[in-house]
Image (cartoon, helix red, strand yellow):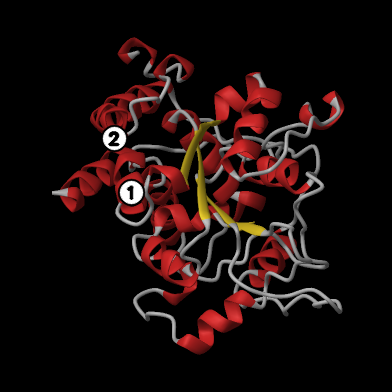
Amino acid sequence: MRQIRLRKVRRRLGLYEPPAPQPKSLPMDKASVRQRRKVFEKLPEHPPCPEGWTTGPPDFVIFGAQKSGTTWWFRLIEQHPGVVQPANQRPELHFFDRLWAAWPSDEQIAEYHRYFPRPKGMLVGEKTPEYMNCAWVPPMAKAAAPDARAIVLLRDPVERYVSGMSHQDRGGLLDEEDAAGQARVFGDRVRVATDAIERGLYATQIEWLLAQYDADHLLLLQYEACAADASTQLARTHEYLGLAPEALPAEELARPRNKSKLDKVVVPPEHIEFLTRYYRPEVERLRRLMPDLDLSLWPHFSDLA
């Protein structure tokens, strides 16, 4: 059934012709984009483990969703004096999403633990938004870190789609042509659009997480609430992680969220209307799964509040 729905989405989005590329305020050439993508094609080196520190499973994992403030929120969490971020380590490991159907061996789990050195009494974690969109990740992550606390940030799925399309079309790579010409370009546009749509199927993704994490080990935050009152939502996060209250300076809380160096893809109004209809059953199902979800914060679904 889901595949049938996605085929309908592809056909519908096949009508979409993006506007002509506009000059970027801070351009990112195609070679730079490709080089950045190569960074995520292999696992990073393990960070150093200073004398007196130990390694082990992470204490928390931010699963996603992509373009919902996860990077910003991770940076706020790590500013707490009880949290450490290992030196020279990017927050997004992409450890489990690359495994696909191969269950991690004991050696791979031990390798994963080596990414999290910390001194006694301090917390360490990671965030990889790709985890949210991979059905096989929650059971793997739970097995590798049984006591870790999961954190999820969700955003109005239509707004997330618009931001996600811009994120996945960095540098205008979808406007390139090769020997296949427009056929390849069209195919890439459909692939990217379909991926962006799937990332907003929150109810399905939350079900994957609820199958592994109980209510005490899963915190749901809404991007819109964090943006409106970061101090209150950060206090919730600290309490959930067992950290003492720690207020941050207003300038830290007010830093830009999801600030992109590239112009956003323009999505036609008729596609916004279509996406709102398409996501509506999923949002209704999500509300049943997570009764505390405040739909008044999501402009395209506030009528369901």
In the image, residue 139 sits, relative to residue 228, either above or below, namely below
For this rendering, which residue is in front, 222 or 171?
Answer: 222
| Cα separation between marks 2 and 1 | 9 Å
For this rendering, which residue is in front, 274 or 227?
Answer: 227
Residue drawn at x 78%, y 65% is: 86
Q: In the current view of this chain or complex, which residue is farthest to the left?
A: 1
Say which amino acid is labelled 1.
Answer: Leu
Q: Is residue 196 left or right of residue 175?
A: left
Q: Which type of secondary structure does the marked residue at label 1 adopt?
A: helix
The x, y position of residue 194, in whole percent, is 37, 48
Q: Quadrant of the C terminus?
A: top left
Q: Is residue 232 left or right of residue 293?
A: right
Mark sitting earlier along the chain (2/1): 1
Residue drawn at x 54%, y 34% is: 19
The x, y position of residue 34, in whole percent, is 66, 66
Residue assigned mark 1: 210
State if disc 1 and disc 2 touch (CB < 8 Å): yes
Q: Which type of secondary structure does the marked residue at label 2 adopt?
A: helix
The x, y position of residue 56, in whole percent, is 63, 73
Say which amino acid is labelled 2.
Answer: Leu
Residue drawn at x 83%, y 67% is: 87
Residue assigned mark 2: 289
- The answer to which quarter of the image holds residue 243 is top right
- The answer to which quarter of the image holds residue 47 is bottom right
The x, y position of residue 36, in whole percent, is 70, 64
Q: Residues within 10 Å of mark 1 (few under 14, many from 20)?
A: some
